[in-house]
């Protein structure tokens, strides 16, 4: 099963804004046109509830987001102007990750056509991220007793600082970030495992480091893997700099899925960042992640 944000308008952004909001709509349209989820289903994401959000976020911050009460500095830090569309999509992103995680526990593999908002901290947003969908999903499922241990494997090219900060000290969640050493955020927060990569790392070295990360997952032995794939490691990405080819990115995804499938480890996918020009390159990479999952799991 896969989930997508409700068909709201694209985020209203000023001319020249660097966030490619259109990519979510294009991804959904391509997935439907290609019949990618014909066998498993593609559903609209539910909105996260207040109770779910406040497992990971300060109630005052949540209220400010919901009511339009964020100060100018808080909006600047998020990097996207406040709007009702932003609120609706942020709630759906968190709800989509939680719904996909529940579906993965039942069927082994699931995901959403959004998610990976790993720069959102407990009481502020950052880096185009308002609420932290994977932190909320992990804490909610732990609180409900659906799982005992969760690993968040973050392969977005930008370090998962918000996820690391929110989940610091939570022994039942393993946070792993495989990211560009010199990329945003420039003030990083220590994850459980951080693998910082040099610019121009390329396919071979990247996959070697990924194997190290997967060994750490095996040692932790989680009940659920939340996989933030990220398309921004591509050589064509404006904000990436790790220089992976499309084949290298596909090899990364297949390695993660083969690892999880062989161990009977449920995995839920969030797509994370992607800023290539044209944006169709990023959309293609997102689709390839789900095609890699289909190849391994046979759905």
Image (cartoon, rainbow, N blue to C red):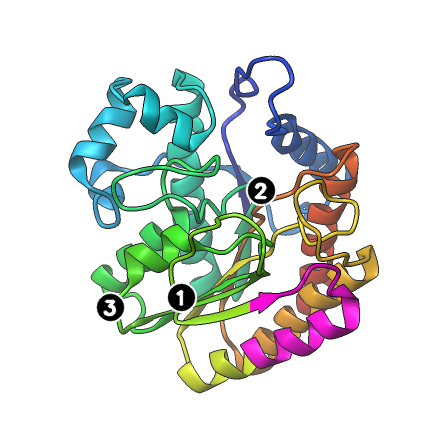
Residue placed under numbered mark 1 in the picture = 191
Q: Which residues are magenta?
A: 196-213
Residue at x 29%, y 55% (from the top left corner): 166
Could you say which quadrant of the image residue 48 lies in?
top left
Percent across and percent down for residue 201 are 73, 65
**What secondary structure characterizes most of the magenta part?**
helix
Q: Residues within 10 Å of mark 2 (few under 14, many from 20)?
A: many
Residue at x 49%, y 81% (from the top left corner): 216
| Magenta span includes 37 | no
Alpha carbon distance from label 2 to label 1: 25 Å
Residue placed under numbered mark 2 in the picture = 113
Residue placed under numbered mark 3 in the picture = 169
Q: Residue furthest left?
A: 60
Q: Is residue 270 visible?
A: yes
Query: Which sits earlier in the primary sequence, circle 2 or circle 3?
Result: 2
In this view, the residue in front, 138 or 192, is 192
Q: Residues within 10 Å of mark 3 (few under 14, many from 20)?
A: few
In the rendered structure, the answer to whether residue 45 lies left or right of residue 230 reads left
Query: Which sits earlier in the primary sequence, circle 2 or circle 1?
Result: 2
Q: Secondary structure at mark 3?
A: loop
């Amino acid at each position: 099963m896969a989930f997508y944000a409700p068909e709201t308008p694209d985020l209203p952004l000023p001319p020249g804004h660097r966030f490619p909001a259109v990519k979510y709509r294009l991804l959904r349209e391509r997935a439907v046109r290609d019949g990618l989820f014909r066998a498993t289903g593609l559903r609209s994401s539910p909105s996260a509830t207040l109770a779910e959000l406040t497992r990971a976020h300060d109630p005052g911050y949540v209220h400010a987001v919901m009511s339009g009460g964020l100060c100018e500095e808080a909006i600047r830090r998020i990097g996207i102007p406040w709007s009702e569309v932003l609120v609706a999509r942020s709630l759906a992103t968190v709800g989509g990750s939680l719904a996909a995680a529940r579906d993965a526990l039942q069927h082994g593999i699931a995901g959403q056509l959004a998610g990976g908002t790993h720069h959102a901290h407990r009481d502020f947003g950052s880096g185009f991220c308002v609420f932290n969908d994977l932190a909320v999903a992990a804490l909610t499922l732990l609180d409900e007793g659906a799982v005992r241990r969760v690993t968040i494997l973050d392969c977005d090219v930008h370090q998962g600082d918000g996820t690391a900060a929110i989940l610091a000290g939570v022994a039942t969640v393993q946070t792993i970030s495989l990211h560009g050493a010199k990329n945003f955020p420039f003030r990083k927060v220590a994850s459980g495992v951080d693998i910082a990569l040099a610019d121009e790392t390329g396919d071979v070295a990247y996959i070697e480091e990924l194997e190290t990360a997967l060994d750490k997952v095996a040692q932790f032995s989680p009940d659920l893997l939340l996989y933030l794939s990220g398309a921004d490691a591509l050589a064509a990405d404006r904000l990436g700099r790790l220089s992976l080819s499309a084949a290298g990115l596909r090899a990364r995804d297949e390695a993660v899925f083969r690892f999880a499938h062989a161990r009977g480890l449920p995995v839920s996918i969030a797509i994370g960042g992607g800023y290539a020009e044209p944006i169709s390159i990023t959309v293609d990479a997102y689709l390839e992640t789900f095609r890699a999952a289909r190849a391994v799991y046979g759905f």
